[in-house]
Image (tube, rainbow, N blue to C red):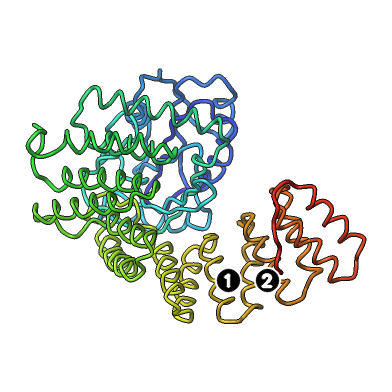
């Protein structure tokens, strides 16, 4: 392993049955750290063998339903000046190793926040988390969704970690969510005033799309954690921050079931609580949720207003991460805010300005499919079909296209009378939606326009065999 010039780094991991993902993780850090320390909590597969093949020091610790206990146990074995905490389902960006080694050679801070890029349901998200800290200056708390408690200042960086743990197959994710839910419920049973556990439980339900469960839990949490009923409440910013985050998660559950009025009510109530407590600045996550709520209602001016307030506040958060320990879930969502503004401007008919915002969104997140699709729609509405087509082709080349991209691309080719190009696009869409009569009719119509009457006839007959009657107008 390559040595840092002045400071040594110990990578610390806790693992259990991670033979599938662990090799990529360890390969990504082997040239960045001076030692790899692993605590195994009961693997029955080849995880330990994989770890030892990378030269890791492997220790064993029984699993006691506490991630913090296991992580703190792992810290005891580290000998480096700095700890790099990474999970088996994560990778360190190789191009950022130089940034990491440079960052640890400063005495001005004890912790380094990195940018976690996570794929959730085929969408890319970014958030910031402390993953590097000086040995002896940090420890973990909470049995699940554990947080590192840091003594001293923090440095904000764009050192990239890629997280794959939310993009597993359906069965693995179901088991993962169930285990997390059980641990969070256990935490709440031990202390019903544990606001951070409530927040994560509601988020856990929302991520599983169990929105009604999230709303029930959120309403219960907000009742329990009011200033008059919570004996541990001290009106501090961190307690109020958790209260605001619970409101944020609950509002998002309402937003997903289109209960926009209730979502706005929760958001405004939380903002008023923060203001009454003299806590500044505004909560960035709640502002983002308000923007999304107005967007869903079709109140585009309101959405633009709150997206802009979010973007202004995001700069403050990024500039103050060295002293601000508050968690911000949407801190990396500047690309989504630019997309939201672009979408709203497009719906207001301001296509050219919308294009600039959408281009900015793509520049900030080149794998954000939604921004590409909105950009293509703007080009289409300004009559620039070639730009619209090229934008959709870019989505395909980035390997982030969903079914609708192929359908939209086929329709754009039809508008250019490029029927030969349209057919394979519709066929790609039809492969996933074989009962879509409209698309089958479009294929048949394209063959007819090309003079392939026999193929067209087969298509029309196939469409006729489908039950749902559809009138196709090219």
Give above or below for 271 relative to 450: above
Q: Which mark is residue 120?
A: none
- Sooner in the amino-acid sequence: mark 1 or mark 2: 1
Where is residue 299 drawn, in percent x and y? 34, 66
Please name the residue that numbered disc 2 is placed on. 412
Give the foreground label among 1 and 2.
2
Give above or below for 363 relative to 76: below
**Image side of residue 262 versus residue 270, left or right:** right
The residue located at (29%, 50%) in the rendering is 263
The quadrant holding residue 139 is top left
**Image side of residue 461 versus residue 211, left or right:** right
**Image side of residue 136 versus residue 451, left or right:** left
The residue located at (44%, 22%) in the rendering is 41
* Quadrant containing the C terminus in the rendered view: bottom right
Please name the residue that numbered disc 1 is placed on. 376
Viewer-proximal residue, 19 or 350?
350
Would you say the residues marked 1 and 2 are in contact, meaning their CB atoms lie under 8 Å apart?
Answer: yes
Give the residue furthest to the right. Answer: 454
């Amino acid at each position: 392993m390559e040595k840092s010039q002045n400071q040594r780094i110990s990578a610390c991991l806790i693992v259990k049955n991670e033979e599938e993902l662990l090799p990529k993780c360890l390969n990504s850090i082997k040239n960045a750290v001076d030692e790899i320390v692993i605590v195994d909590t009961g693997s029955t597969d080849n995880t330990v063998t994989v770890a030892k093949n990378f030269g890791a020091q492997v220790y064993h610790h029984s699993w006691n339903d506490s991630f913090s206990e296991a992580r703190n146990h792992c810290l005891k074995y580290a000998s480096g000046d700095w700890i790099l905490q990474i999970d088996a389902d994560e990778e360190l960006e190789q191009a950022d190793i130089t940034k990491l080694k440079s960052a640890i050679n400063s005495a001005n801070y004890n912790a380094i926040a990195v940018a976690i890029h996570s794929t959730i349901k085929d969408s890319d998200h970014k958030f910031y988390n402390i993953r590097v800290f000086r040995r002896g200056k940090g420890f973990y708390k909470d049995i699940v969704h554990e947080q590192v408690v840091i003594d001293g200042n923090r440095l904000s960086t764009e050192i990239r970690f890629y997280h794959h743990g939310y993009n597993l197959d359906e069965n693995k994710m179901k088991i993962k969510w169930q285990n997390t839910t059980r641990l969070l419920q256990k935490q709440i049973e031990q202390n019903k005033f544990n606001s951070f556990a409530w927040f994560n439980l509601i988020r856990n339900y929302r991520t599983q799309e169990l929105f009604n469960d999230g709303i029930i839990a959120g309403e219960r949490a907000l009742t329990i954690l009011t200033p008059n009923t919570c004996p541990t409440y001290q009106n501090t910013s961190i307690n109020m921050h958790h209260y605001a985050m619970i409101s944020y998660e609950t509002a998002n559950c309402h937003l997903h079931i289109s209960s926009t009025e209730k979502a706005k009510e929760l958001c405004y109530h939380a903002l008023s609580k923060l203001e009454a407590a003299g806590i500044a600045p505004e909560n960035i996550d709640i502002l983002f949720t308000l923007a999304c709520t107005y967007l869903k209602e079709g109140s585009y001016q309101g959405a633009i207003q709150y997206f802009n307030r979010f973007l202004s506040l995001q700069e403050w958060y990024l500039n103050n991460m060295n002293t601000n320990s508050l968690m911000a879930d949407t801190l990396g969502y500047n690309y989504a805010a630019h997309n939201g503004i672009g979408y709203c401007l497009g719906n207001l008919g301001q296509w050219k300005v919308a294009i600039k915002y959408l281009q900015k969104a793509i520049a900030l997140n080149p794998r954000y499919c939604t921004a590409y699709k909105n950009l293509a729609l703007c080009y289409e509405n300004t009559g620039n079909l070639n730009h619209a087509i090229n934008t959709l082709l870019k989505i395909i080349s980035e390997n982030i296209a969903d079914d609708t991209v192929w359908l939209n691309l086929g329709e754009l080719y039809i508008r250019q009378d490029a029927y030969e190009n349209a057919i394979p696009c519709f066929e790609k869409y039809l492969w996933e939606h074989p009962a879509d009569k409209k698309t089958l009719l479009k294929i048949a119509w394209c063959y007819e326009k090309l003079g392939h009457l026999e193929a067209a006839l087969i298509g029309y007959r196939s469409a006729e065999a489908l039950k749902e009657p559809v009138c196709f107008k090219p």
